[in-house]
Amino acid sequence: MAPSLAVHARRGAAALATAAALAAAAAPAAFADGSPSPAPGLYGTADPKFDGVFRQSLALVAQSATGVTPAKAAVDWLAGQQCADGGFPGYRADTSKACDPKKDEFTDTTAAAVQGLAAAGGRSEAVKKGLDWLKAHQNEDGGWGYQAGSPTDANSTSIALGAFAAAGQDPAKEAAKGGKNPVETLLGFQLGCDAAEGERGAFAYLKDDKGLRADNLASAAAALATLGKGFLAGPPKQDADRPVKALECSGDAEGDKAGPKDAAAAAEAVDGYLVAALDKNGGYLLPSMPGAPAKPDQGNTADAALALAAGGHRAAAEKPLKWLQSKESGTAEWAKGQPGRLAKLILATRAAGGNPRDFAGTDLVAQLNATGPEPEKKATGGMTEEDEKKDGGVTVNVWWIVGVGLAFGAGIGFLISGRKKKQQL
């Protein structure tokens, strides 16, 4: 039976909101008086109403990944946003007020917060509560929607899978519901050989009576999830690189419904789609949101770079990163003062084996640290600046001499669900 008009409207609103947040093409409005954030420990001075938890989570992951120990106040702020049942909202201005589970709590923010707290360390109880919330709000098909009761979508399912991975759990085992493997559920959103040639291997955001439609945001998110990874993807081994293989289709492609057979094959196929989409535009991706201006999407481009690097495709990842470094991309200005965006650039750069402390001459780590409370003096995890110089032995400029932002503009690609088109990192 075809979904009702109400369901279609609901799905459309969710798709637009998530796409807007992930694309993050425009900076959110800062507080009118330009003063620092009124919430002690929160990164950034922009209005946190929709993306406070998400940008904080990304910042903690990026700091931990680069040998920076986040300030206790920053970790406390994120943990303090958690609702009594374990879920997380986009932002709680008054944490003494109970959350409304039907309105305030979201899959993407909960999954992102789990990853941020897991990276920071020392918050195992909050991490467990977050994972328990995800399992309690899982759809019958094994996937997740942006909010409890929402139809399963590829973005939310991908970030949720990343949360389990960040906590060291196998979602295929720990989050199976009624015999439904959430990883297999995600694979159901991938376009196969019966799709148009330029869309094969891509992932759709939602399923509806019109079939699957290739979506760049969903594709970058799913590329990480099918690898069993979250936002934090470690640097590849020195000189390691794997060629990208697009989905191979034989016979009459129009009638052939063949597609990737498992998660590993799905990861390869979506990487092939991302490379083709990037090459088509000269190194960047365009927004997937219907009606969005056809201009470069730095956020989604960064997410794609992270996904390709996580898949071991270093050379392929260097192309979008080179574009992000260029003056014409406008990435430096786009990310300035924006913790979520800076964090995504840091994670993508590091994953590709580059040095986020030298992003075309810019120290992304220092810029990120400056948006929030001063980090602790002692580093307890991730890579120090000296470690990064030794690992791979090359700086960002060298890696990209041959020549993102963030998909989730908040969204890492990353991904962030929102409720309005202006919900952006």
Image: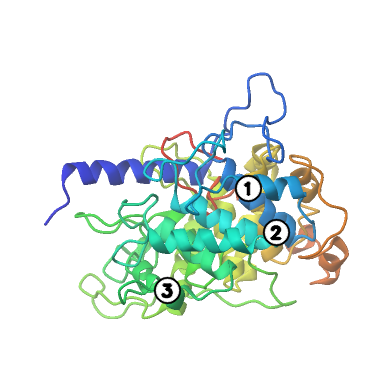
Residue that mark 2 sits on: 120
Callout 3: SS = helix
x 39%, y 61%: residue: 136
Q: Amino acid at mark 1?
A: Leu
Q: Residue furthest top?
A: 33
Find the distance from the CA under tag 3 to the CA under tag 1. 33 Å
Q: Earlier in the sequence, mark 3 or mark 1?
A: 1
Q: Nearer the viewer, residue 359 or 384?
A: 384
| 179 is higher (above) or lower (below) than 362 | below
x 85%, y 71%: residue: 390
Residue 221 located left or right of residue 38: left
In front: label 2 or label 3: 2
Badge 1 density bin: few <14, some 14–19, many ≥20, Cα 10 Å:
many
- Quadrant location, the C terminus: top right
> Do the numbered discs 2 and 3 sit on residues whose CB atoms are within 8 Å?
no
Disc ID at residue 78: 1
Find the distance from the CA under tag 2 to the CA under tag 3. 30 Å
Find the distance from the CA under tag 2 to the CA under tag 1. 11 Å
Q: Nearer the viewer, residue 399 or 81?
A: 81
| 86 is higher (above) or lower (below) than 268 | above
Q: Earlier in the sequence, mark 2 or mark 3?
A: 2
- Quadrant location, the N terminus: bottom left
Q: Picture coordinates of residue 243 (x, y %)?
A: 57, 76
| 390 is higher (above) or lower (below) than 379 | below
Q: Earlier in the sequence, mark 2 or mark 1?
A: 1
Residue that mark 3 sits on: 266
- In which quarter of the view is residue 373 placed? top right
